[in-house]
Image (spheres, rainbow, N blue to C red):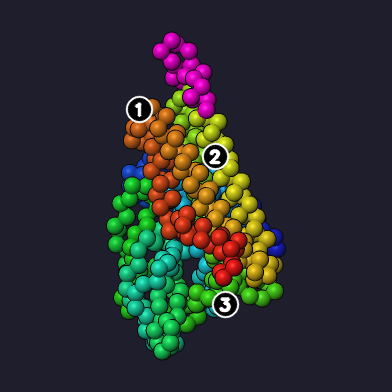
Amino acid sequence: MTVVDAPAPLAAAHLRAAAARHAEEAERTGRLHPEVLGAMTAAGLARHFVPRRWGGTAGRFAELLDTVAGVGAACASTAWCAVLLAAHGRLAAHLPPEGQRDLWGDSPDVRVAAAIVPPAGRLARAPGGWSLSGEWAFASGVEDADWVLLASLDHSGGGAPAYRVLAVPREEVRIHGGWDAVGLRATGSHAVTVDGVFVPEHRTFLREALVAGVAGADAAPCHRVPYQLVAGLLFAVPALGAALGALDAWTGLVGPRRLPDGRPLTDDPAVQQTLARCSAEIDAARLLLGAAAARADDAAGAVSGSRDTAAALNQRDAAVAVDLLAGAVERLMRTGGARGLLAGGGLERAWRDIHAIAAHAALQPAPAAAAYAATVFPPGA
């Protein structure tokens, strides 16, 4: 077992370059290129939240934000898979020690996919563990995973069903390639099925562990953070990258063009106003997500009430940030001219990708607003 004394920085320059080189091919094939997958591992994404006792980094959320946003400017699908690769390692850190050993005993660079919201399938007690069957949707990156986290409801207790997360080896999971979406096309977010697979008890944990965070003074800060405090943040980060990529693409389209009188199009006040407003909205979203990442990094030692408030703030800020980013990219798309509409261009791909991200349930404005309002107007007040 390797012990890491301090987190190593994510090294994403090669990943961003590889993502840029293969973005169009990934769009056509619906799958990330092997060079991109290798660069993702080399950048430290798989091990970013893996406990240090297994050679992982147990890293910070702010660092992940900067890395994934930079990659997303080149390819939002790569950014989506990258952030979830890290996030699913953090989820798996809630497994009992023996289960963690099954995953990371040989290496911290293990690819974990997941489909845990909502729970699905059928779960039954078996000697020493559980028998699991059923179908789950939207397991991003599952084609290239080593393990898959699946969630199901346990009705064996007689009372309210328990929400259980189970780690299943990828070779025991069947993939149904139905992911053919308008955006995030290369994420491979396919449906998966299992049929009576046995999962030992030590490869399972209850949702309550995610809600409470890993207990114990020896748990790293990133593992003590409740799931609800970071879920929206992690899903929002690829949108920041997509918006940065859209702004770069728009600038490249507008810069060389001319007005009818021969002057540069960039002299047009409408173009200048679009640039100023959209870049400011992207910067504002970056500040919101940066503040959310800082709250997540600082939340490990907070008391329960403070964590609840931080979770509501982060849910609010992630939803508002994505709304700002989607609005900015929408405006860039409308003013990018006919060339911006052409398939294969960075602007139209970013436009599709950011709308796909904004549709995610964790980023919807209404529940975010309700969660935040409950901290300002307590029930019964």
Q: Please tell me whether mark 3 sits on a helix, a strand or a loop.
A: helix
Q: CA distance from mark 3 to mark 2?
A: 44 Å
- Residue found 41% across the figure and 34% down from its top: 333
Q: Nearer the viewer, mark 3 or mark 2?
A: 2
Q: Can you give x and y, in whole percent of width and height, for residue 248 in the image?
A: 50, 33
Find disc 1 in the rendering and name its residue.
Answer: 338
Find disc 2 in the rendering and name its residue.
Answer: 281
- Residue found 47% across the figure and 27% down from its top: 252
Residue sitting nearer the eye, 212 or 74? 212
Q: Are marks 3 and 2 in contact (CB under 8 Å)?
A: no
Find disc 3 in the rendering and name its residue.
Answer: 97
Q: CA distance from mark 3 to mark 1?
A: 56 Å
- Residue found 59% across the figure and 58% down from its top: 313
Q: Residues within 10 Å of mark 2 (few under 14, many from 20)?
A: many
Q: Please tell me whether mark 2 sits on a helix, a strand or a loop.
A: helix
Is 169 situated left or right of 182 in this image? right
Residue type at numbered disc 1: Ala
Residue sitting nearer the eye, 271 or 203? 271
Q: Residue furthest top?
A: 261
Q: Residues within 10 Å of mark 1 (few under 14, many from 20)?
A: few
User: Where is the C terminus found, in terms of image quarters?
Assistant: bottom right
Is 169 situated left or right of 52 in this image? left
The residue stretch that appears in magenta: 256-273
Q: Can you give x and y, in whole percent of width and height, for residue 323 in the image?
A: 48, 47
Q: Can you give x and y, in whole percent of width and height, for residue 149 in the image?
A: 44, 69
